[in-house]
Image (cartoon, grey):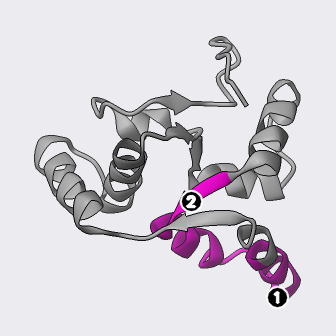
C-alpha cells in the first residue's frame, strides 16, 4: 500500500512522471492509493490549477483514501518535529506513512532524511525499486 505525496500528484497531472516509472505509478493509482489530508489540502490548493483542472483534481482524489489526522498520527508528527529538521506538512505526511505502514511515493526523498519511512521515488531511476502492486 502506498501514500502519495503532493509532488507526485502534480507531476502526474502534468504528465511529467518518467517514462520508466509510468506503469508503476499507473498501477498504484489503479489499484488503490492513499493521500494524507495535508496532501489533499496542498494539491487542491495549488494555485496553478484553473477551474477545469481543479474539477479534474477533485474527481481524481475521489478514488483515493484520504487519511485524516488522528491521535496516533498527531503524536508521531510531534515526535518527528522534535527529532528532525522537517517542515510540518512533511512531518504529517511522514507520520501518516509510518503509522499506517505505507510506502511513501515522493520525488522529494531528501525532505524526509532521517525519518524511518519507506520511500519509492519514481524519478530516481538509478535505484530501481521492485514494488509489489
Q: Is residue 19 depicted above or below 88 in this figure?
A: above
* Residue 23 falls left or right of residue 57: right
Q: Which residue is most to the left?
A: 82
Q: Is residue 124 depicted above or below 6 in this figure?
A: above
Magenta region: which residues?
33-58
The answer to whether marks 1 and 2 mark residues whose Cβ atoms lie closer than 8 Å is: no
Query: Which residue is drawn at the image coordinates 33% and 50% (left, top)?
Result: 95
Q: Quadrant of residue 117?
A: top left
Q: Is residue 78 depicted above or below 68 in this figure?
A: above
* Residue 49 falls left or right of residue 70: right
On-image quarter of the N terminus: top right
Q: Nearer the viewer, residue 57 or 103?
A: 103
The circle drawn on residue 51 is 1
Residue 22: give x, y in percent of width and height.
Answer: 85, 35
Q: Secondary structure at mark 2?
A: strand
Q: Quadrant of residue 127?
A: top right
Query: Which residue is drawn at the image coordinates 68% and 29% (left, top)?
Result: 123
Q: Main secondary structure of the magenta part?
A: helix
Q: Nearer the viewer, residue 47 or 66?
A: 66
Query: Which residue is drawn at the image coordinates 19% and 41% (left, top)?
Result: 84
**In this view, the mark in front (1 or 2):** 2
Query: Which residue is drawn at the image coordinates 49% and 41% (left, top)?
Result: 102
Q: Nearer the viewer, residue 90 or 31?
A: 31
Distance from disc 1 to disc 2, alpha carbons, whole Å, reads: 22 Å
Q: Residues within 10 Å of mark 2 (few under 14, many from 20)?
A: many
Give the labeled residue for mark 2: 35
On-image quarter of the C terminus: top right
Residue 32: give x, y in percent of width and height.
Answer: 71, 51
Residue 86 falls within the magenta-colored stretch: no
Amino acid at each position: 500500500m502506498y501514500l502519495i505525496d503532493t509532488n507526485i500528484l502534480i507531476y502526474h497531472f502534468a504528465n511529467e512522471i518518467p517514462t520508466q516509472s509510468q506503469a508503476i505509478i499507473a498501477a498504484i493509482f489503479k489499484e488503490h492509493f492513499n493521500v494524507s489530508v495535508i496532501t489533499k489540502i496542498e494539491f487542491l490548493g495549488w494555485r496553478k490549477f484553473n477551474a477545469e483542472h481543479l474539477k479534474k483534481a477533485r474527481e481524481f482524489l475521489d478514488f483515493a483514501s484520504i487519511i485524516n489526522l488522528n491521535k496516533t498520527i498527531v503524536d508521531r508528527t510531534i515526535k518527528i518535529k522534535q527529532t528532525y529538521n522537517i517542515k510540518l506538512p512533511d512531518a504529517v505526511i511522514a507520520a501518516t506513512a509510518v503509522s499506517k505502514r505505507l510506502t511513501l511515493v515522493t520525488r522529494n526523498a531528501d525532505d524526509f532524511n532521517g525519518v524511518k519511512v519507506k520511500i519509492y521515488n519514481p524519478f530516481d531511476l538509478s535505484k530501481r525499486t521492485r514494488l509489489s502492486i
